[in-house]
């Protein structure tokens, strides 16, 4: 069972009180959710994540996988990051992939994959498998032609202990920051339906590699 988490939600901006409520992520507190990034031309991150998630689900189901989304549509708000983690824990026993796009510097290009730091009592039981999933996704995403992020250290990897979707997960989990929405070349790709197909192919290839080697 796989959970695909399309980051944010298309109407988060209209519910500031709800998405700004504070939730406990184990290592601290965070806002329930955020609006996500928007390109300079007005293309919103939740629109991107929703479009790619549909393509991923379509491909996985064609392969016979059982797939759950953390939100049913792109015209609501939330759910909170704690609720998304709970959905992952209930339905994503094999793997959870959270789809995002970054709001980096104007002159910075590229993608990076985030996986959880080892946290005793939280992620120590899933950190190694999450890293393995991250490595599979990193390798397959390179096939899209998107370079690794040149504005971050880590050669396209980031290990975090401050994201509720990671710290509260009981399943192998990664976040994909698919490119930089503030860079002209990256955003042109991220908006392109053909490139979105490549992104979906890369995510599915990573999951097939990860689950096949489990």
Image: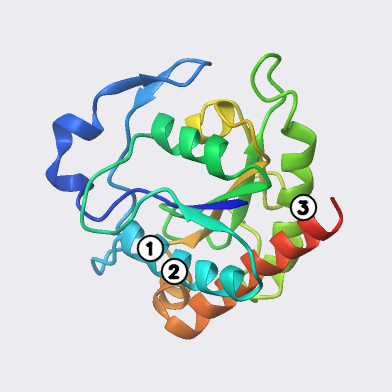
> Residue under circle 2?
54
Residue 76 drawn at (x, y percent):
21, 51
Identify the residue at image location x=67%, y=14%: 121
Where disc 1 sits, the SS reads helix
How dense is the environment of label 2, judged by Cα within 10 Å: few (below 14), some, or many (20 and up)?
some
**Where on the picture, by quarter, is residue 79?**
top left
Q: Is residue 52 above or below residue 91?
A: below
**Which residue lies under the disc numbered 1?**
50
Give the side of residue 175 with respect to residue 94, left or right: left
Instruction: State the image coordinates of residue 148 (x, y, percent, origin top left).
Output: 65, 60
Total marks placed: 3
Is 17 left or right of 98, judged from the image as shown? left
Residue 159 image position (x, y, % from top left): 66, 35
Residue 169 sits above or below residue 133 on the image: above
Asked where in the image residue 116 lies, by quadrant, the reply is: top right
User: Label 2's element?
Assistant: helix
Q: Is any atom of residue 130 visible in this view?
A: yes
Label placed on residue 135: 3
């Amino acid at each position: 069972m796989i959970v695909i988490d399309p980051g944010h939600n298309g109407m988060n901006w209209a519910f500031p009180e709800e998405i700004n409520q504070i939730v406990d992520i184990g290592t601290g507190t965070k806002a329930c959710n955020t609006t996500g990034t928007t390109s300079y031309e007005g293309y919103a991150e939740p629109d991107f994540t929703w479009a790619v998630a549909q393509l991923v689900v379509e491909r996985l189901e064609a392969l016979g996988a059982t797939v759950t989304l953390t939100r049913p549509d792109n015209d609501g708000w939330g759910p909170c990051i704690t609720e998304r983690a709970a959905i992952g824990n209930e339905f994503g026993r094999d793997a959870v992939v959270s789809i995002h796009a970054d709001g980096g510097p104007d002159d910075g290009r590229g993608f990076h994959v985030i996986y959880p730091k080892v946290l005793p009592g939280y992620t120590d039981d899933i950190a190694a498998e999450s890293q393995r999933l991250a490595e599979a996704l990193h390798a397959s995403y390179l096939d899209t032609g998107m370079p690794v992020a040149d504005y971050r250290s880590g050669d396209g990897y980031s290990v975090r202990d401050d994201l509720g979707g990671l710290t509260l997960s009981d399943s192998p989990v990664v976040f994909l920051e698919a490119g930089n929405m503030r860079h002209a070349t990256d955003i042109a790709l991220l908006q392109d339906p053909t490139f979105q197909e490549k992104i979906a192919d890369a995510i599915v290839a990573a999951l097939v590699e990860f689950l096949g080697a489990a």
